[in-house]
Image (cartoon, helix red, strand yellow):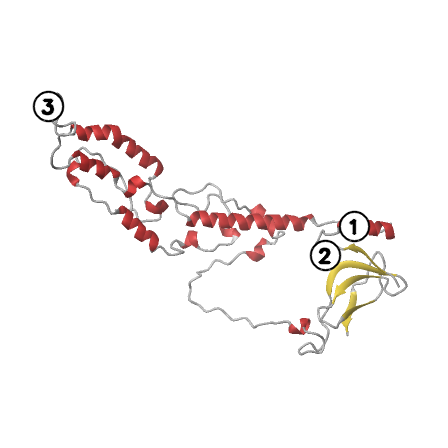
Amino acid sequence: MALKKLAFSRQSGTCLGVAAIGFVAAMTLSTLSFAQTSCDPQYMDALESRAYLEAQREIAMNQNLILKPDSVLEYSCFDRIMRTIARTTGDRGNFSESDRWGAVPDHDAESLDRAFDEVVSVALQAYITANYSHTFLGGRTANAAPFNYAPQNVVGNANAGYTCGNILAVWNAARCMNFNDRPAQDFFFDFDYLKGNPDKVRILPNACADSGITQTWIDRAFNNQAGRYVLNPENPLDAAAYTTDALVTYLDRINPFGVAPAAACAAGIPTGVVVYRQGAAPEYYYEKVCPNPGCYYVPNGAGTQAAPSNTGDCQN
């Protein structure tokens, strides 16, 4: 009796060896359809789409939790440094307001203050407004001192002195920050929650225009069955204990035959391979593997080239 593996059926879900098997099939039975050897493009689409969705979700969560760095000018309160220099006590002979060499026309006690404002403060305020118009840590801290920074002019504020605890305050805030401080952005989400425009997670300091996750990608990833995988909206911290599922080992299906609890051979597992054996019934049948050691598959029923047998059982 000759056994010949003719082809993979669509049950196999794999593309390996398609060309070689197709060649064997053509050589042995020219009438065997090559439809049995083709790959299912929907399966590949689902793999591609699921990989994209998983990667995009991880990227979005990382970009949300990795915070935008703040400016050193903010941490050092640079405007107060200028105010202290402009109005420092003691000998001011080295500054432009000095009258050491006599009176200077149009100079007064705030000449240096105005010079700082015109040369530095205007540029400093424009730079901070354009790039750091949010609170510290990318906008995650409170909108109040010492977690925000708005540089002031030197004129009118020069006697305030230099006091700046910003870097200590923001360090403590970052050190004590817990995961899921903002449940609507920091939690673990399914694809259905993340889809749409604008982004629901990457919103600080400004929201991203597109989440990168669309219903089309979700549909392809779940073979148009996405509704089966959408989590029901609920409070994840409702303190209700979960129901413990019974442990199912399936030892009856994997233990050797005769070793408890394997009192019988478990059902065969289809491989997707069509077997042709000459001179035995059924001649054509779908191959199955018996999971229990010591068991082997015995096909039965009628099987033809057009309709291979799919019945049989594992025996010992």
Find disc 1 in the rendering and name its residue. 20
Q: Is residue 60 above or below residue 316?
A: above
- Kindly report which numbered mark, 1 or 2, lies closer to the viewer in this rendering: 1
Task: Work out whether residue 24 or residue 150 is closer to the camera in this orientation and state it.
Answer: 24
Instruction: Look at the numbered discs 1 and 2 and tell me whether their residues touch, using CB distance below 8 Å.
Output: no
Q: CA distance from mark 1 to mark 2?
A: 16 Å
Left or right of 87 on screen, residue 133: right
Nearer-N-terminus badge (2/3): 2
Q: Amino acid at mark 3?
A: Trp
Q: Is there a contact, CB below 8 Å, between mark 3 and mark 1?
A: no
Left or right: where does residue 118 sit relative to residue 310?
A: left
Q: Earlier in the sequence, mark 1 or mark 2?
A: 2
Mark 2 → mark 3, Cα distance in angstroms: 97 Å
At label 1, the amino acid type is Ala
For disc 2, the neighbor class at 10 Å (few under 14, some 14 to 19, many from 20) is some
Q: Amino acid at mark 2?
A: Ser
Residue neighbourhood size for the residue with mark 3, other residues' Cα within 10 Å, grouped as few (<14), some (14–19), many (≥20): few
Residue 298 position, x and y percent, is 80, 69
Residue picked out by circle 2: 12
- Marks 3 and 2: in contact by CB < 8 Å? no
- The circle on residue 113 is none
Classify 10 Å Cα crowding around label 1: few (below 14), some (14-19), many (20 and above).
few
Q: Quadrant of residue 94?
A: top left
SS state under label 2: loop
Q: Position of residue 66 (x, y in %)?
A: 42, 48
Residue in view at x 67 percent, y 49 percent? 42
Quadrant where the N terminus sits is bottom right
Q: Which mark is residue 101?
A: 3
* Image point (38%, 55%), residue name: 181
